Image (cartoon, rainbow, N blue to C red):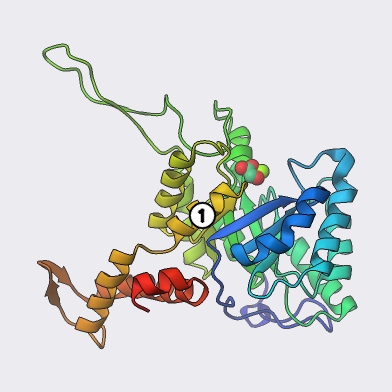
Amino acid sequence: MKLPASFYQPLAIGAPAPYRELPMALERMIHFFPAHNEKVQAKIPGLIPNVDVILGNLEDAIPATAKEAARAGFIKVAQENDFAGTGLWTRVNALNSPWGLDDIVEIVSTVGDKLDVLMVPKVEGVWDIHYVDQLLAQLEAKNGIKKPILIHAILETAQGVKNVNEIAAASPRMHGMSLGPADLAASRGMKTTRVGGGHPFYGVIEDPKEDGSARVFAQQDLWHYTVARMVDACLSNGIRPFYGPFGDIADTEACKVQFRNSFLMGCVGAWSLHPVQIDIAKDVFSPDAGEVKFAMQILEAMPDGTGAVMIDGKMQDDATWKQAKVIVDLAKRVAEKDPERATAYGL
Ligand code: GLV
Ligand code: MG
């Protein structure tokens, strides 16, 4: 086992020191673009100011014949644009694929100084993180990169879920994790054909009625268990959990409900696969103005965060003060980027 004292040491001579705390960032949506598509590449300058994170996808959904073009397309987009406060991420191909190594080496060697986060798919255990961690340190050192590139794991195999706590704690380079419901469903042998969301047959039914009338059936959240495990693994290690993709682009209502469940459970953002999902994510992952105002009332009523007060008939104490602080801190981060919401929050 690595000594605790070595945990924050750079893994290569000349690589930047790992962060001891994650840099603050508003990451309500990770907006995916297919990096090989030239029409989409041309739209990136217009997208950058409208999203929190922009991610060039090289992995699934990119045909095998376009993998090299996607890698080159991402490098071109990274070189030609100024991302200002918007995060620049890429999702590379899996470590066991023919493309994963070249994706990492070529991208970090050319645009590593602009890349904030490397999303690694199909992470199964700490060995995957340790491999990428070491490789990134070597590439950072070789290319004189000053800011450590962070790692974001996709939780999308049964083995990965089993090892989720160890993955979250594997390296100071860990940024967070996203649920990958499509691959996870396949890996677990779930009997679905969807990318996230519910299923009409997964639910609970009320007991038989004496009068024989119809029993109410209510759909349940297929992802509750995994999101809960992911949130605990992430938050107990100081990293960030995200709901991943919602594939039914036309069903904006269900997308909103699925995103909102994850927000309430602790996630900070989700993927947007289509521009229509950008505003859904903004709406869901920015705290509600009413909640922000109530949270501010709690903070004001308990300036040192201790004791107990009643507000609108509801008991507040140190624990609700901490909840209120989570909401107000997030509202302040949102307000810095979003003048409309700043006004609605009174900030
Ligand atoms: C995402 O990569 C997923 O498999 O859902
Ligand atoms: Mg996947």
Q: Secondary structure at mark 1?
A: helix
Q: Left or right: where does residue 331 sit relative to residue 128?
A: left
Q: What is the residue that sits farthest to the bottom in this orientation?
A: 304
**Quarter of the N terminus within the rendering:** bottom right
Expressed as whole percent of the image width and height from the top left, the position of residue 49 reads 63, 67
**Quarter of the C terminus within the rendering:** bottom left
Work out whether residue 197 can be spotted. yes
Expressed as whole percent of the image width and height from the top left, the position of residue 196 reads 53, 39
Task: Using a 10 Å C-alpha cutoff, classify the residue at mark 1 as few (fewer than 14 neighbours), some (14 to 19) or many (20 or more).
Answer: some
As shown in the figure, which amino acid type bears the numbered disc 1? Asp
Expressed as whole percent of the image width and height from the top left, the position of residue 246 reads 55, 42
Residue drawn at (32%, 70%) of the image: 292
Residue drawn at (44%, 46%) of the image: 256
> Relative to 139, does residue 280 appear above or below in the rendering?
above
Q: Left or right: where does residue 81 sit relative to residue 30?
A: right
Q: Which is nearer the eye, 102 or 299?
A: 299
> Relative to 277, does residue 84 appear above or below in the rendering?
below
* Quadrant of the displayed image that contains ligand 1: top right
Residue drawn at (68%, 75%) of the image: 84
Q: Left or right: where does residue 303 sit relative to residue 58?
A: left
Q: What is the residue that sits farthest to the top in this orientation?
A: 212
Residue highlighted by disc 1 = 279
Work out whether residue 127 can be spotted. no
